[in-house]
Amino acid sequence: MNAQGLRPLSPAYDPWDPFDTRLAEGEYRLTSVEFTVTTLCNLRCEHCAVGDTLTTRQAQALPLDLLLRRLDEVPTLTTLSITGGEPLLHRATVEDYVVPLLRYARQRGLRTQINTNLTLDPAVYEPILPYLDVLHISFNYTSADDFVAIAFDKAGHTVSPAHGRKLYEQLVSNIRDFAQRGVFVSAETILTERTAHKIGAIHRLIAELGCRRHEVHPLYPVDFARTMRLLSLDELRAAIHRLLDERVPSVWILFGTLPFFACSDNPDDLALIRRLHETPNVTVRNDPDGRNRLNVSIFTGDIIVTDFGDVGPLGNIRTDSLVEAFARWQEHPAGRRYRCFCPQSRCCGPNLLVAQSYYPDVDFTTRTGAPLADAASLPTR
Ligand code: SF4
């Protein structure tokens, strides 16, 4: 247990992964809620999954009491996440929503995460640290030049390289400082044409800066990224093997939204899955979206199943409980072909975006995953 009496997050304990609940309960439960608390951001990254919703003015949010009441109604909750935009950019929102939500979560024993680009003044982050488990950042760079190219790709105007470099230096300095103070910094890299060939170098820099975890996801070309190229399965497989070859063993690597499944008839997929499973300090998280997590906008109150938004709102917290909205998703026709579950493969199936991107014609409910070597020990995690 850590100083607050909570089990440390580790490859053996990732409460955002829906697998263990599904295995134990025989069905999915709503264990995770994510709040979108701002549509402001000081960056305009090329891969941003919410880019089209970014604005330059903070809208009026719903009352905090309503948000907390809706959380109170979910007895199965174990994690709470805060996302944006950049959630720390708007001071009043930090004081009136971000800190109270995180404090509520901590008092309830929930595990917490905030998604930030970490380029702001370090003092901005101090009020959230007492209540935070995971400081989740984006890191797709090996240099300041990479940062400038990626983080302002969609700015729509010229950003001075000096300004970009200053933000990168702030980011690097913040990572080092927070990591040294024991904050669990988890750096996420998106595998794209730009990053896939140098994923090993990005990883080593992340390790050198002191991040505890490196989270790696393929790019899915939606929103700002809609003009970017979806990497082929061969390219993704090669990038993942490259990262495993070059990794720093002390850093936990968490892969998410991977398009590789144990029901594949491609031996290369199965070899990769085996390697991922057998490599110490490496995990593949089953995607929370649609399995155990809902996202709520604090402005509109809309309840959605993913950041990617290609399924309309499942309800609104002004009129619906989160439990009702979650039940609606479990019956939603959009996910029907992907409601597979193979405990012997530790797999909850693809999410909608992964399936639509790589397997548009596959009915996963007709498939069965190959067992992993130590399937018998799965429930003990
Ligand atoms: S759970 Fe679905 S995607 Fe995973 S191995 Fe089984 S059939 Fe394939």
Image (tube, rainbow, N blue to C red):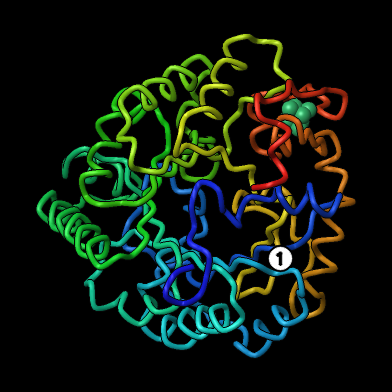
Residue 116 pos. (x, y %): 38, 62
- Ligand 1's image quarter is top right
- Establish whether ligand 1 lies closer than 8 Å to the Cβ of label 1: no
Q: Tell me which residue sits at (52%, 68%) in the image.
A: 112
State the count of labels. Answer: 1
Residue 259, position as x, y percentages in the image: 61, 28
Left or right of 295? Residue 47 is left
Where's residue 81, x and y in %? 54, 66
**Residue that carries the numbered disc 1 in the rendered image:** 303
User: Which residue in the rendered view is the most extreme toward the left?
Assistant: 162
> In the rendered image of this protein, does residue 106 appear above or below residue 202?
below
Q: Residue at x 78, y 47 (%)?
A: 23
The residue nearer to you, when weighing 106 against 325, is 106
Q: Position of residue 355 (x, y in %)?
A: 69, 31
Number of residues whose C-alpha sits closer than 10 Å to that of mark 1, classed few (under 14), some (14–19) or many (20 or more): many
Quadrant of residue 70 within the rendered picture: bottom right
Q: Quadrant of residue 327?
A: bottom right
Judged left or right of residue 263, residue 279 is: left
| Residue depicted at 32% across the width and 41% down the height | 140
Vertical arrangement, residue 79 with respect to residue 164, above or below: below
- Determine whether 4 is above or below 219 in the image: below
> What amino acid type is highlighted by mark number 1?
Ile
Q: Is residue 334 left or right of residue 19?
A: right
Please report the residue visible at 61 percent of the width from the left and 49 percent of the height from the top: 308
Please, what secondary structure does the residue beneath circle 1 have? Answer: strand
In the image, 358 versus 225, the foreground residue is 358
